[in-house]
Amino acid sequence: MRPATLVRLALAGTRTDTARVVLTALSALLATLAGLAALTVLAIPTPTATEENPNRWSEQYHNALLVEPGLRGGTAFALLMLMLPVLALAGQCARLGAPARDRRLAALRLAGATPGQVTRLVVLETGVAALLGTLVGLGVYLVGRDLLHRPDARGQLALPTDVLPSSGALVGVVLGLPVVAALATTVMLRTVTTSPLGVSRRAARERGPRPWAGFLIGLGVVSFAAVQPVEERFDDNEGVLTWLVPLLIAVGGFAAMIGVVIGTGWISYQCGRLLRRHARTAPALLAAGRLMADPWAGSRTFAALLTAVIFGAGAAALRSYFVTQDQLDRQQSQLAGADGGADPFYLSTMDLVDAAVAVAILIAAGGLIVALVEGIVARRRAYAALVATGVPRGALSRSVAWQALTPAVPAILLALTVGTLLGRGLFPKAVRGESSTQVCTATAELCADPATRERYLAVIGTPDIERVPAVPLEHLAWLGAGALGAVLVTVGVGLLFLRTSTALDELRTA
């Protein structure tokens, strides 16, 4: 099969196939913008130390996240975290219209295409869609960089529009994301067999998932808890800390997120077992059967949402630490007879992190909608058969709600717990060291006079104080409510497609 023919077949299809390509390209566009933004932050040059600028700050910006070199790594990491729900959304979009695509691939096999050619066709479809998205994303980035380059009256910038990542980095993002998408499609198709009679998947499971995900979650929590002891142990060996601490955080965070996502499969299976054992209504029993038949559907569906919840819960624990540290600083200042407290920079920065979490939850909600609608459309003949045998559509609607909400509630609680433990492990307690301050105990007039000030000076010492940050229950409750609200909205949108998918005409669909 010639390459031109392969490309033409990859771009052919119905309106559902066109929607899948457009949504995949949109996901790649968003991922490209997040990746290029992170690379732009990392590309900010650090000036050499001078007498006027000993801290090597980039004073052409007025945002401290960009000014201070030590904060840019965390800012870039937060931007890269936004790519996770976007990539999960791309994975959900790739499954849109899967039954119709399977029939089209089977027709190609019937026309003489080999299994390898059919596989390459699907991989090329995903890769081309992702490449279109990355190219458009690069264009949006370059145009937005020029439009947002607006220095203020002091010549400072709000965004790093004066720097540009290297050409290799730009090419790596634009071409790397389509390659990753194509490789992921290849991995997902490893158990798929396309024959002239249809598409089959060798994914039969005779027993439910095992709770091995708990090991990954424990590894993540232990890795974060080990950061502070490692910093104390290698305090004088900066060469070790520069790679060991980031490694612990990266490995721990990745293991915890994978553990929660995989653990959702085990939660779905156990919820299905409990429903089958104790439920007495048809909707709950139907949901129980679906949860046990495909427990990994919850892991695929809620992956992006749970990742955002973990990140948000960790940010809430970090905010609680900063609040406690601020209280200690204010208390020490009051003991020393001075007013003031900590720099509110970190607390204001956490507001930006919360905004990023909200954006991630919105993106994840889009992935939830695509996954739920795709599941309803893929099983439309089964739903239509149930309606034909007398099952009310209301019972099917309640079954879909049971199937979505039953694993979602414990999975969200697990994600909140794990995120909080990660944040608490990284910052277990707030500490304010012992200090001493000279304070003038006389009136303002006497203290202002250098001749009399010395007689009324007193040294006030402040003790060493440690305090464990409080668990941010209110913040976690709002975060969990937002995630659960996203699931409820998704269920409501998905049920709109249920009526059209249960029409009796679907029984005549080939």
Image (spheres, rainbow, N blue to C red):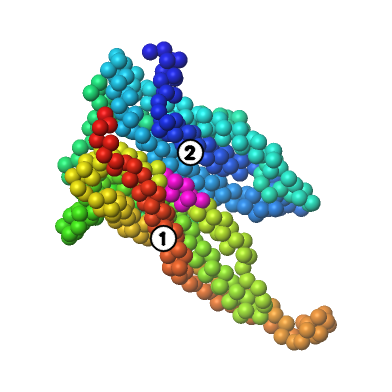
Expressed as whole percent of the image width and height from the top left, the position of residue 419 reads 41, 57
Q: Quadrant of the N terminus?
A: top left
Q: Residues within 10 Å of mark 1 (few under 14, many from 20)?
A: many
Q: Residue furthest top?
A: 2
Quadrant of the rendered image containing residue 488: bottom left
Q: Is residue 481 left or right of residue 53?
A: left
* Label drawn at residue 480: 1
Magenta region, residue range: 359-368
Horizontal side of residue 72 vs 185, given as left or right: right
Residue 385 pos. (x, y %): 22, 41
> Does the magenta portion include 364?
yes
The residue carrying mark 2 is 27
Density class for disc 2 (Cα within 10 Å; few <14, some 14-19, many ≥20) is many
**Quadrant position of residue 325:** bottom right
Please state if 474 lies on the left or on the right of 323 as rendered.
Answer: left
Residue 158 is covered by the magenta coloring:
no
| Residue occupying the point 65% across, 42% down | 44
Residue plotted at (42% across, 57% down) = 485
Report whether residue 80 is seen: yes
The image position of residue 316, as x and y in percent, is 48, 61
The kind of residue tagged 2 is Ser
